[in-house]
Amino acid sequence: MHRSGILTIVAAAIFATAAISAAADTPANQPPPAPGNHNESLVVGAGAKKMTRTFIVHVPPGFDGKSKVPAVIMLHGAGGSGEGAIRETGFDAKSDHEGFVAVFPDGTTANPTLPARFLTNPRLWNDGSGRGAIGVENVDDLGFISAMIDFLEAHYSADPARIFCTGFSNGASMTFSVGLNLSNKVAAVAPVAGHLWEREKQLAYPVPLLFIVGTDDPLNPLAGGKVTLPWEKIENRPPVEDSLREWERMLGCGPQVQTARGKGVMEITYDQCARGGEVEYYRVTGLGHIWPGGKSRLPEKWVGKPSDSLMATDVIWDFFKAHPRTPAAKAKPIAKND
């Protein structure tokens, strides 16, 4: 079975049982979750693959638990955490201002018996590249994210038509994978400074994509080539735009339109897509491997220079607002050979 399978039958049964149990234990008049951060967890998988996965759900003021609200899933980079992604991107503040639920899941470490540490035991996502222990062990991150979406819809009034996913670096590559393999569950995706590593590339539904990268990113150079990671590993990276071309191909997009946005920001749009959706691409001059307009705790010698020429969190949310999942997209999947 292709790795895009949502969960194994056993894992699905475990999750369903847990959800039913939780619902049975919840008083009918329980108040909605209070504004702020809520630490949540799910048990996914079965047998040796069974594990507890953790994530933070940020609830905005005015949340009543009844009205359907958008949900934005933010996937941290290699060595990061959901908590760290909050500080780096400011999606919690954006959630408060715009009224969506912001979700910050944690990847997994190679050695779960030891504390997670950036250099010695980093949290990672199984992004389809097969890299590292997480890839070798084939951790079912797609199953986790799919179950988390179900949980958000059941417990945080997440609107199935407005589930969005974004991520940075390794989290960006995982975002590509989510958009590709969970295209029936997410409305749009926005990877920042990552690659589409998946080998089997076929969208079932036309998922719009926004992509951002810096021109001076030392870990994802525009032209590709060999890069040295903070873990003193050398990897060969493909040209950044290869990933975009694959998405354009899957959506059947026409010619690009380039627009200079000022402050060294170039926007490239592909909005004439025969199969639906669109692709937006921002190149930020001088930006290194850092969330645009955000914060990084890593030294400049590893990741390059920051830039506030583009505020990624604002741009991404505007893109998401404009791309809810439409009934037409639900009803008309892309044919396998279309």
Image (cartoon, rainbow, N blue to C red):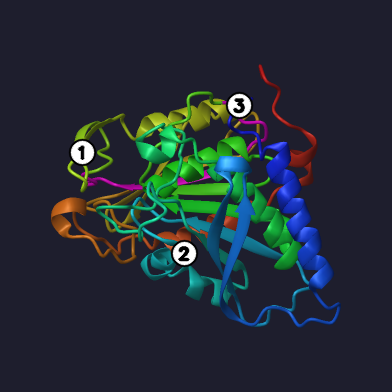
Q: Say which amino acid is labelled 1.
A: Lys
Task: Please tell me whether residue 175 is drawn above or below residue 98 in the rendered image.
Answer: above
Question: What is the spatial separation of the Cα atoms under label 1 and label 3, in whole angstroms?
Answer: 29 Å
Marks 3 and 1: in contact by CB < 8 Å?
Answer: no
Which quadrant of the view contains residue 96?
bottom right
Please identify, in this view, whether the residue under mark 1 or under mark 2 is nearer the observer.
1
Q: Which mark is residue 233?
A: 1
Which residue is at the front of the view, 28 or 180?
28
Counting from the top left corner in percent of width and height, residue 117 is at 30, 59
Specify whether 136 is left or right of 238. Answer: right
Q: Quadrant of the N terminus?
A: top right
Residue 208 appearing in the image: no
Question: What is the spatial separation of the Cα atoms under label 1 and label 2, in whole angstroms?
Answer: 33 Å
Residue at numbered disc 3:
2
Counting from the top left corner in percent of width and height, residue 312 is at 41, 59
Task: Please tell me whether residue 299 is drawn above or below residue 210 in the rendered image.
Answer: below
How busy is the neighbourhood of tag 1: few (under 14 within 10 Å), some, or many (20 plus)? Answer: few
Mark 1 or mark 2, which has the lower sequence index?
1
Q: Residue furthest left?
A: 301
Question: What is the spatial separation of the Cα atoms under label 2 and label 3, in whole angstroms?
Answer: 35 Å
Q: Say which amino acid is labelled 2.
A: Asp
Residue at numbered disc 2:
314
Counting from the top left corner in percent of width and height, residue 227 is at 20, 37
Q: Give the SS element for disc 2.
A: helix
Specify whether 254 is left or right of 293. Answer: right
> Which residue lies at the image location 31% right of the left edge and 29% below the top edge?
238
Q: Quadrant of the C terminus?
A: top right
Q: Which range is magenta?
A: 202-218
Marks 3 and 2: in contact by CB < 8 Å?
Answer: no
Please identify, in this view, whether the residue under mark 2 or under mark 3 is nearer the observer.
3
Counting from the top left corner in percent of width and height, residue 116 is at 35, 59
